[in-house]
Amino acid sequence: MKNKKWITLATAVVLAVTALPLGVFAAKKDEAKLAKVTLNEVAHSIFYAPQYVAIEEGYFKDEGLDMTLITGFGADKTMTAVISGEADIGFMGAEASIYAYQEGATDPVVNFAQLTQRAGNFLVAREEMPDFKWEDLKGRKVLGGRKGGMPEMVFEYILKKNGLDPEKDLSIDQSIDFGATAAAFTGDDSADFTVEFEPSATALEKQGAGYVVASLGVDSGYVPYTSYSARTSYMEKNPDIMQKFTDALQKGMDFVQSHTPEEIAEIIEPQFPETDLDTITAIVKRYYDQDTWKENLVFGQDGFELLQDILEDAGELKERTPYAELVNTEFAQNAS
C-alpha cells in the first residue's frame, strides 16, 4: 500500500515537473510562428496614438506579427532605413517617397496606409494671444522646421493662405535640429514664436515659457500628413505581412474612433513613461478634437494631389508624380 502511494506521488511530481517545460516550449513555438517585421517611425509622438493603441492592445501579435518599433528622428533617416532594408516599413510624411522617386529610386518606396489627416504641430507664442491672427507674425522671428519637411511646408502653406510671404514678411529660423526647437525657444529669447509638436507644445505651456495660439492642423485643413510605406519589392514578396500589418493598424484606428480621449490615453501611457497621464490625456484630446485621425487607412488621390500642390508651392517638386506610382490602396481597402 505504501509502495502504491509512493508510486502515485512520484508520478504526480513527474507530471508536474514536465508540464511546465512543455508549456514553455509551446509558448516559444507560438512565438517562433510570428512573422518578424521592423517599423521605423519618423518620431515618437502622441500624434500617432492609433499606432500605439495597436501595439499596446496586442493587435499586431493577434495578426501573427512580431513587430519591432524603431524611431528614426526625421523623415530622411526613416527613408534611408527603408531603402537600405534596415526597416521593412517606414512611417513618415509621404513627401519623402516623392523625393526618393524624383531621385530615380529603382525600387520605389510606396505608400499603402494613411494615418493622420491633419498637421500635428502648433504655433507657440511667448505671450498669451487670445485674439491671435496670422498677420501678427509680420516682422517677427519664428523657429520653424527643416526645409522640405512637412511641418515647415504646411506652415508656409498657411502663411501664404493668409497673405504672408514667408521670405519677406517674417524671419523663419530653419537651422535647428528636429526636436530641439523647444529647448532653443526657452534658451534664447530672440525668437517670438516656435512651431512645436506635442508633447513639447504642452510642456512649454506648463513651464509658463509659451502659449499655444494656433493649430496648424486646423488652419491648414485636411492634409495627408503621415503615412506608412515600404519598398515595392518588399510589398510584392510579403503581401500577407502587409495585409496583417494594415489590419492591426485599422483595429487601432477603430479603437480611437470609438473611445474617449481618457480611454485612449490610458492605453498608450506605457509608450510615454516620461509624460504623466494628465498631460497625455490633454494632448490626445487636443488631437481628438481637431479630427486628426482618419476612420480608415485609405490614402486617397485628392490628398496625394494636395500634397503635391504644397510641395510645388514650396518649390520642392521637380515634376508631379502619378498617384498610381507611389500609392497602393489594396491593403487599406481590404483591412478589417
Image (spheres, grey):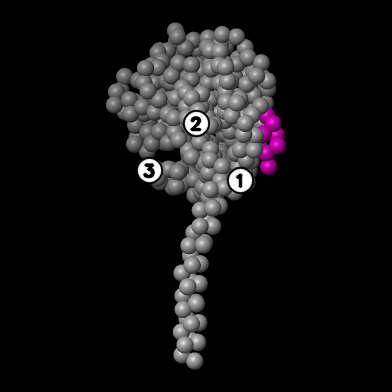
Closer-to-camera residue (197/282): 197
Q: Which mark is residue 87?
A: 2
In the image, is residue 105 part of the stretch drawn in magenta? Answer: no
Disc 3 versus disc 1: nearer the observer: 1
Report the magenta residues as a range.
329-336
How many marks on residues?
A: 3
Q: Is residue 191 left or right of residue 299?
A: left
Residue at 48% across, 82% down:
7
In the image, is residue 333 part of the stretch drawn in magenta? Answer: yes
Closer-to-camera residue (138/316): 316
For residue 261, say whether it is visible.
Answer: no
Residue at 68% across, 29% down:
329
Q: Is residue 268 left or right of residue 248?
A: left
Query: Is the residue marked by circle 3 packed among few (<14), some (14-19), or many (20+) residues within 10 Å?
Result: few
Say what amino acid the circle numbered 3 marks: Glu
**Mark 1 — residue?**
63
Residue at 54% across, 57% down:
26
Q: Is residue 273 above or below residue 8?
A: above
**Mark 3 — residue?**
274
Q: Secondary structure at mark 2?
A: loop
Q: Secondary structure at mark 1?
A: loop
Q: Is residue 268 above or below residue 158?
A: below
Measure how far apart labels 3 and 1 are at the Cα level. Answer: 30 Å
User: Looking at the image, is mark 1 or mark 2 earlier in the sequence?
Assistant: 1
* Residue found at the very far bottom of the displayed protein: 1
Residue 312 at x, y percent in the picture:
57, 11
Measure how far apart labels 1 and 2 are at the Cα level. Answer: 19 Å
